[in-house]
Image (spheres, coloured by chain):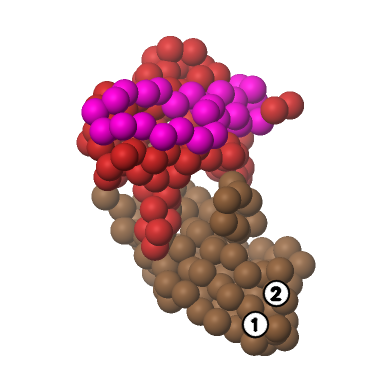
Amino acid sequence: NAGVTQTPKFRVLKTGQSMTLLCAQDMNHEYMYWYRQDPGMGLRLIHYSVGEGTTAKGEVPDGYNVSRLKKQNFLLGLESAAPSQTSVYFCASIPGGGRVKNTEAFFGQGTRLTVV
Amino acid sequence: ILNVEQSPQSLHVQEGDSTNFTCSFPSSNFYALHWYRWETAKSPEALFVMTLNGDEKKKGRISATLNTKEGYSYLYIKGSQPEDSATYLCAFRGANSNDYKLSFGAGTTVTVRA
């Protein structure tokens, strides 16, 4: 199993450009999350999804949109990139139902995004 | 926004010494508390998932305790080794039926000096 896969792994954008980050998981997990990692701030939750067709805002949602059209994919979009969105982005997933309480989150390898 | 706080932000430990650090979280609506080990340029690696008040878990030289009534968890590293150098993250999940968030603290960065 591939687990959680993020694409792309690296990207440089110009201010104002748009892009979509893809998170794909092959573990049939219900819950998926997008985080950004900035120095000294740990992982901050951007948006999350509790199932196909559902999304919700996290702690730092401004400037980002998400979609979960298929259970295995969670997309993070930047409509008009800003230098403040330069960060490393991590996707994670957790199974739902009775398995969720004692199960850790599974992470992708991260996407390093630079906005110039 | 959930307040998940970790202290200290960083610490330096001499090889062979033991150390511990704290994660504090909301004491109401507790569901689960996670600990992860995180190295630069890598994905976080799960250490423990703790769900019951009084839980104690151990993995090699690393162990953790949980107090859900007062809202804190300790992570202990016994006989620190250079390979223990990493950032340790805790994450909180609430029991609110509408709250599926997994909210992280800012981490404690441990540097073990040989």
Residue A8 is a magenta residue = yes
Q: Amino acid at mark 2?
A: Pro
Which residues are drawn in magenta?
A3-28
- Residue A106 on image: x %, y %: 59, 39
* Element under disc 2: helix
Report the residue at 55% width, 19% height from top.
Answer: A72
Side of B23 relative to A103 (left or right):
left
Q: Front-most of B16 and B72?
A: B16
Q: Pointer 2: what residue?
A: B82
> Can residue A77 be seen in this snapshot?
yes
Residue B18 location, x and y as percent? 65, 84
| Colour chain A is painted in | red
Q: Quote the CA–CA distance across marks 1 and 2.
A: 6 Å
- Judging depth in this view, the residue of A96 and B40 nearest the camera is B40
Q: Which residue is mark 1?
A: B113
Does any portion of residue A45 appear in the rendered image? no
Q: Chain B rendered in what hue? A: brown
Coordinates of residue B1 in the picture (x, y in percent): 26, 50
* Residues indicated by labels 1 and 2 sit on the same polypeptide chain: yes
Residue furthest out toward the top: A69
